[in-house]
Each structure stands twice: as C-alpha cells, then as structure tokens.
Amino acid sequence: MSVRGNRGGLCQYTPPMGIFDEVHGPSGVRPHYRQLMDRLDTIGDADLADRFGLIESIFRTLGITFAVPGHESGIDRTWPMDLVPRVIPADEWRHIEAGLIQRVTVLNRFLDDLYVGSQEAINDGIVPRWLIESADGYVREAHGIPAPGGSRCVVSGIDIVRDEEGTYRVLEDNLRIPSGISYVLENRVAMTRVLPVGFARHSIRPVDHYGASLLRALQAIAPPPVVDPTVVVLTPGVANSAYFEHSFLARQMGVELAEGRDLLVDDRHVYLRTTRGLKRVDVIYRRVEDEFLDPVVFRQDSLLGVPGLHGAARAGTVAIANAIGNGAADDKGVYPFVPALIEYYLGEKPILPNVTTYLPWEPDQLELILGRLDQLVVKPVAEAGGYGIVIGTGADEATLAATAKALRANPRGYIAQEVVQLSTHPTFVDGQLQPRHVDFRPFVLSGDGIEVVPGGLTRVALKEGSLIVNSSQGGGSKDTWVLEDGLEDAVTTR
Amino acid sequence: MLSRHAEDLYWLGRYIERAEDTARMLDVTYHNLLESPSTDETRAWKELLEVLFLDAAYPGPLEGRDVSSYLVTERSNQGSIISAVARARDNARGLRDGISTELWEAINVFYLELARADFEIDIERRAYEIFSSIRSRCQLISGVAAQTMPRDEGYRFMLLGWMLERAEMTCRLLAVRYARLAGEEAEMGFHTWASVLKSVSAYEAYLKAHDASLNPTKVLEFLLLSQEFPRSVLYCLQLVERLLERLAESPQQTRVERAIGRVRARAEFCDISVIVNEGLDQFLEELQKEIYDVSEEVEEHFFRAGTDLQLHSYRWA
C-alpha cells in the first residue's frame, strides 16, 4: 500500500505509452482536469466504489436499460456509466463546434443538392455518381422530396476520435437515425446525484435544454405556411431497442409518441388518430428506418410505417426528419469525400480532419491495402454498431486471408483506414482507475440554424486495450462536461 | 390523446374489472355450495359459466376444481383471470408514460403472482385464499389508480372501461340467477339471493339499507337501481354518463351521449314491481343490449377516427 493508499483518484494511475491520455499530459494532469482530479483524490477508494455502485441503482430505478442484440433472453443490461466524467475545455469545444457546424452544413447542402438540386458536386466530379447511387442508404424515391430550409440532417451524430497527437478527427457521420442523446441527458442527471458536491458547479455547460432545441429545429422544418406545427415522434414500438429513447424524447418535447398505426394518410395529408378525431400532422421525427416508412413505396411487409407517407412527403404537406435517403451521405464509402465536399461548397479547409482512409475500389489503393492488411482497419460500409470490423494488427492469418478475399470480391463493400490509437481516459474498473480507450459522439441539430449540444456521448471500451466502444460490444459511457469559457484561467490560477 | 392509448386504457380497466368479477363469482359459487349442501353442484357451475358466456366453450367436467382452474389459470381460455390480467399487463406495458409507475407495478406483480408455476395446486387447497387474494389485488390496482393517476383524459377512459364492464357483469349475473330462481319457492331462494349479493360485495350494504328477509324484488332493486351502492347498474351508468360528457366535450349531444342517456334513463325511471311482473328476463336483456350499444358507440366515437375514410393514398404509389 502506498503512502496515499487510503486515497482514491489518480495516485496509482499510469497512462499508457504512445497514446494520448485525456487527463495526463507530459507535465502531469492537464489544467482542465485538475479541479476534478483533486476532488476525486480526496474521496477514498471505498467511497468511490460505493458511489460507483450507486450509479447502477440509479439507472435501474430510472429504468434505463438497453437490449443487447443477439441476447434473446430479454434481460436488458443497465446502462453502464463510468464514474469519471470526460472534460472538454472551452477552447477545444469551440474548435469541435466550428468543425461540426462546417461539416453538417456541407452534408445538408450535398444531400439537398442530390435530391432536389442540380447535383453540382456530382456533375463537377467531386464525388463519383456511381459511388453515391450504389450506396446502401441512397434512395431513388427520395428525389423531389423537399426539405424546408434544406435541413435534411435535423439530428446528426458525428463520431469523433482523438489520435496519438490529440488531434480530433471525424471517424463516422450518422445522418439517418443517430441514437444516444437520451443517455447524454440521463448520464448528466445520474452524475449530479453521484458527485453532487458543488465542484465546478458554475463551469459545466448544461445539456438539459435538448428537448426544447430539438422541438425548435423540428418546428423550423414544418412545411410552409403552417404557423403552429404539430410534431410527433414516430417509433417502431416497444419492441425496439431504442424505445426508451423515443418515449424519452417525446416526453422531453411534450409531443405525442406515435406508432405507424396511429397515423394515416388521406389525400396526401398525414393525420394522427386521436380521441377527438383526426389531427393534422406537420412534422414527423421518425425513428423508423427508410425502408420501413411506407409499405406502398418501400418494403411491402413493413407494419411499422404509414401507407402513403412517402406521397405526402413528396407533396410537401409533411416534413420528415431526418429526410429520406440521408444514407447517401453517411455511407462509409462516401465519408472519404466529405473533406473535398467541404472545400467544394464552402471553399474552406476542413476544421476537423478525417481519419486517413483507403478506397479498395481504386486498383492501386487495393494493392496498397492488401500489402498492409495487418496494419490497417477494414470496415464494411453498410454495417453499424462495430460489427464486421477487422483490425489488422490483432487479426490472425485466417481472418486476414478471408478479409483479403472479401475485399477483392466486393471492393465497394469496404473501406480501409489507418489504425487510430484512440485516446485513453481514466475509467473506474475493478475498483481503481485504469486507462481505457474512448470516442465521442456529439449531437448536431439543423433547423433555422445549426446548433451543437455542448456535450455528447463519450463511449468507453471497458475491455483493456480494446478499441471497440459500441455498447452492443460491451462498451460503457461517460458523462461529458463542456466547460464554460474562461474556466481554464480560473483553474490554473487557483 | 392518441386513440390507441385511450383504447388501451379503456381495456385495461375492463380487464381488471373482469378479473375481479370472475373471482367474486367463483368465490361465492364455491362457498355457497359448501354452505347449502342441497344445491345441485353441476347446475351451479354451469350457471357460473353461463354468466361469463363460457358455457359453450368449457371442455371439462362441471366440478369446482376443474371450473376454477379453467376460470383462473387456463391460458387457452380467453375469458380466464390470467388471460385478462396478461392483457391488462400488455396494455400497461405499452402505456408506461400514460400510467403511474405504481399502477404498472401493481399490475405487473399481480400477473407474476398468477403466472407462478405452483399456482394451480394452490387452488385445490386454499380456494378462499386464492379468490380473496385475486379480489384484493384488483382492489389494490383500482385503489392505486385512484390515488396516483392525474384526473386527465386517460384516467377517464380507464374508469369508463371499468364501469361499463361492471354494469354489464352485474346485469349478466342477475339475468342468469333470476332465470334459476323463477321456478323455485321463495324460501328456497334465500341462499341464492344471498350469494348474488355477496358476489358483488353487496350483502352487508343491502342489510344496512333493508333487512335480512332478502325480499327478491328489493334485492333486484338494490343491485339495479341503488344510487349509493357503487356496484349497482344505475350507479355505474350514471358515472359512465358523467365521464362521457367530459370526454366528448361537444356542445351538441353526440351519438355516444345519446346512447348512454337512453340506457341510464331506462334504468333510472323503471318501476321494479312492473318489471318483475312483466318479465325481468326481457328487461335485463334489453338493458344489456343497450349497455353493449354504448360500448360500440364509445369505440366508434373515440377509437376509430378515420376508419370510415376512403383513403386516397394508394393513388400515389
């Protein structure tokens, strides 16, 4: 036992070599973490463990669990939140925020251009047409569906990682139905209960206005000339693993949570079936995937959608968020072209760079990929949730051979990327703080303007050394604190 | 509110009332047989099944143990208590935002208790315990609902279902029991009438209002027309009428309000001695039909918005 063995916190924490640690810099604890770490240091190990136990019971009481796909037992796991929050200082946040606004502005423009515009970016050769039209999420039937204000990505979740140098990089865009915001809000609630003492209480930017901001963004895309638009959340139903979030958001916004059978389309207008008769619906925040939205146009076996919804959207009597067909822009094969799109539309350099990516469908790049397969990450373009990813550095011969074969057979189906050693963060594991890899998903709202919620979902790979942070793959989460402007000074001079 | 949510709440109320009434009737039939050994057992169980419209579907022997299992724990029987509670729980699960957590818990615990593997064996040994525990579970649920739910539209729909089911069940009970009594001497009927009263928890209330002579006409009048007793048909119908006025919120009388007004007036202004002389059977039959009409109108008015439309959406395929 060390001299300070009865104290918790960072005394035994060793950041890993060659990786950017969020808390520990070359000269000790980074300024924006000092206050928090001092606080954790004064709480004993035993007390920390108690508080950690409290988290589970808080989430169980709140009923916040998630279903793990492939585990049909029906027993949901409690949402795993870590005790140590992630802290983002104001200057770093300004950088992230500017980068996100720039990126989402361009993604909105590109999609609007693609579906209702003149397809400039494609015609000018910035992105190959065949690539867009072969994207899984490209929807031919979305052509001509208007999006007021061009806000096709009303809610975007942009996954960001930090590389070995600490540079924030975009890893993935999620422009269809990104989930996780309810955990951001609930993590904050739980955190205030677990570590209530007023440390840094004036310095953390709040996130609890998300419901109001989302509603404002949704109202902003209502088809003109509606003045007081009726907004509903469309959910696939209780069986969906994200149902908790759907009902949470409906409550936060104070709008109805509808299933497909609660809506009907008559003469190209959408109505809600209520006890007072039919009520016109102007905006649908749908958490149902494109192909299930309307059995008349998409999958005929879908019971989750509303017959005629696509026609109403095309007639412009109802706005659907996010817009149909957004998958054309968040396809992993299209991702490598986003920096070029930013330069094309805005004439600016990307503020947040991509991760270096290779395109297997380019013959010379395919050879490069195959030659370095044991050093790269290969990702299927159509999978989500961390499924199907092969990390070359840890893969055996058979896996590499199978991956090479798959790449040759279907080069459009994959991308390859340099392995990013995600930054680490002290995380409470087995009763002490240990380094674990983290990523970050901030949420961006596009309505009248673009708003970035100051915070986001920090996901953490609870397995030692693992780079896969998805909750479906045993990942956890952290509350994420964005500090108010000017705090760094306050902390360093204290 | 969403029609689907309103409908789920309405049926939630109906299912819980149905479970409670079924348990009451089982309890009384069972103990009536013990108290008056001369009663024809087969006939008593057959009547119980008739009240519940399950006599045709029932496959087993007309004995207490079999009928009880069929009515309590038989999942293949849509009219069993466990089926009603399972459906109430399904509704409650989809309504988590629309009902209080306490109400959800009360329903969930009730279901889990009924679904326990050893429940069936218990019935044979401890009939009284089982029936009264089901009854008190249902009473707990209605109490929790009354204490924890805001008096909003959703609550009114739940209560509406609850009261319509109760009015129907009381009518059915009277119809079947009266048919039996018709051929018997008055004194032979004492136990029958006592059991009718007990099965709706009205025995003590009746004794307070009248006396122990159990005049059949007075019993009928009490169960049909009491303004004070909360399980009488008139009491339920008056409550339904007030609920529907609030729910319809329409300056003109709607069809559903006219339907409830009709049946409430029929009950309220009837002359019980005339009815007894001219045929209770027919009166009860008409009353049941009119209550059923109210249910139909409720579904039509509140839950079926848009079903009469000629949908034009398919032209846009």
Image (cartoon, grey):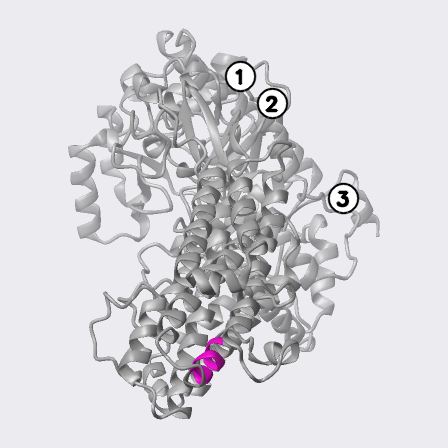
Marks 1/2: CA distance?
8 Å
Magenta region, main secondary structure: helix
Look at the numbered disc 1 and give the secondary structure of its residue.
helix
Front tag of 1 and 3: 1
Residue B230 position (above or below residue A141): below
Measuring 51% from the left and 49% from the top, which residue is drawn there?
B263
Say which amino acid is labelled 1: Pro
Tag 2 residue: A220
* Chain under callout 3: A
Q: Which residue is mark 1?
A: A148
Disc 3 designates what residue?
A488
Residue A228 rendering spot, x and y as whole percentages: 64, 24
Which stretch did the figure color magenta? B189-196
In the rendered image, residue B293, in percent from the top left (x then y), is placed at 43, 46
Q: A13 or A44: nearer the eye? A: A44
Q: Amino acid at mark 2?
A: Ala
